[in-house]
Image (cartoon, helix red, strand yellow):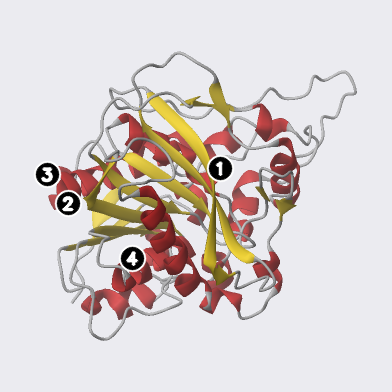
Amino acid sequence: MIKLLLSGVVAASVAFGPLAAPAHASTPAPSAPVLPAPTGPHPIGTATLHLVDSSRADPWTPARRRELMVTLWYPARTKTGTRARYVTPAESAQLLAGLQVEGVPTDLLSRIRTHAVTGAAPSRTGLPLVVLSPGFGLPRSSLTSLGEDLASRGYAVAGIDHTYESMATTFPDGRTTTCTACDIEDSPGLVPAIRSADVSFVIDRLTGPRPAWGPPGLIDASKIGMAGHSIGGNSAAQAMLDDPRIDAGVNMDGAFITPIAASGLARPFMLFGAADTFTPGSPDEERSWRDNWPRLTGWKRWAAVTGAGHESFTDYPALGDQLGMPDRALKGARAVDVTRAYVSAFFDRHLRGRVQPLLDGRSPKYPEVKFQTVG
């Protein structure tokens, strides 16, 4: 169980593959799957940023400075233009191999077109910012459906590839790095602190009078949240402890490999995970949420999603369903819908001050979600 919680690669490979090659030679190759459409009223723009932290050596490759690839999603003036591709061909090949998907073209994932228009002008300034951190081994693209949906609802969203912690990250010079950290036995214990530093650097570069992209004032630096999947969720808590600019956080199905400090975290935080793993007292309970719950001393919620697996909070079940993935209790498209609803409600409440009854009890629209009362 702990291996599943630590490694998005393991969880996603269970969900996304392996897929057998077509049995008949004339069977056409599968068409590219389609990402779920965003639900908000705004068109979406996107930009890809290459950011270099000249003040910091890369913790996994110390001979280099720490450099990050970041996808920025935001509400745009128009939906007309070239839609961004999901990943590069090199990233697609590495991801499909890592996810054990067989019998499909190696560039299949790069054929997916997102719902965001490359380089579209932002429709407004003063946007609240949500930072997204993926699971260990997974790329920033694994959270595209959530990032696009938040942008369609009026947020700026920064999805970070934590270099050498992802199966594949392509840089502008053509390099595609792989997951060096995946081969280091004790690396998970180092990840939350490394990602915390990454997040603070990205916030620095996106805010202030000379941001890395967009007009000054695009982002309202007084309204910043963070959500992460798996160890990215643990990292959200660590980043909040380290950086007081982050006002609210969500841990999506991530064990606390690094515990919350004994002094506690007094800002809003939501635990949102699979019921089999994170229901108190269940046979397969992962106890780190129970152990760290008392250290969340501000507004908090603990929600367990029936039928969800570790990968259900990413794009991969929705994509895998279209490639012949076996049935599951919580279908991929439904998993995306549930995740979007609760994460957006959380940030609407805590970054925008909007009342969100969805966070206060059971909802007939989302019967899979049950809030836990923990003593």
Residue designated by label 2? 350
Residue occupying image coordinates x 72% and y 25%: 30
Query: Which dot, 2 or 4, sits closer to the camera?
Result: 2
Amino acid type for the residue under numbered disc 1:
Tyr
Asked if the residue under mark 2 is in contact with the one under mark 1, i.e. CB atoms within 8 Å, the reply is no
Point out the tag, 1 or 3, that comes first from the N-terminus. 1
Residue designated by label 1? 316
Instruction: Give the CA separation, mark 4 to mark 3.
Output: 22 Å
Residue designated by label 4? 279
Q: Nearer the viewer, residue 25 or 336?
A: 336
Residue designated by label 3? 357
Question: Crowding near pointer 2: few (<14 within 10 Å), some, many (20+)?
Answer: many
Task: For residue 367, say whether it is visible.
Answer: no
Query: Which dot, 4 or 1, sits closer to the camera?
Result: 1
Point out the tag, 4 or 1, that comes first from the N-terminus. 4
Asked if the residue under mark 3 is in contact with the one under mark 4, i.e. CB atoms within 8 Å, the reply is no
Query: Which dot, 1 or 2, sits closer to the camera?
Result: 2
Q: Relative to 169, say whether 75 is above or below.
A: above
Asked if the residue under mark 4 is in contact with the one under mark 2, i.e. CB atoms within 8 Å, the reply is no
Q: Residue furthest right?
A: 25
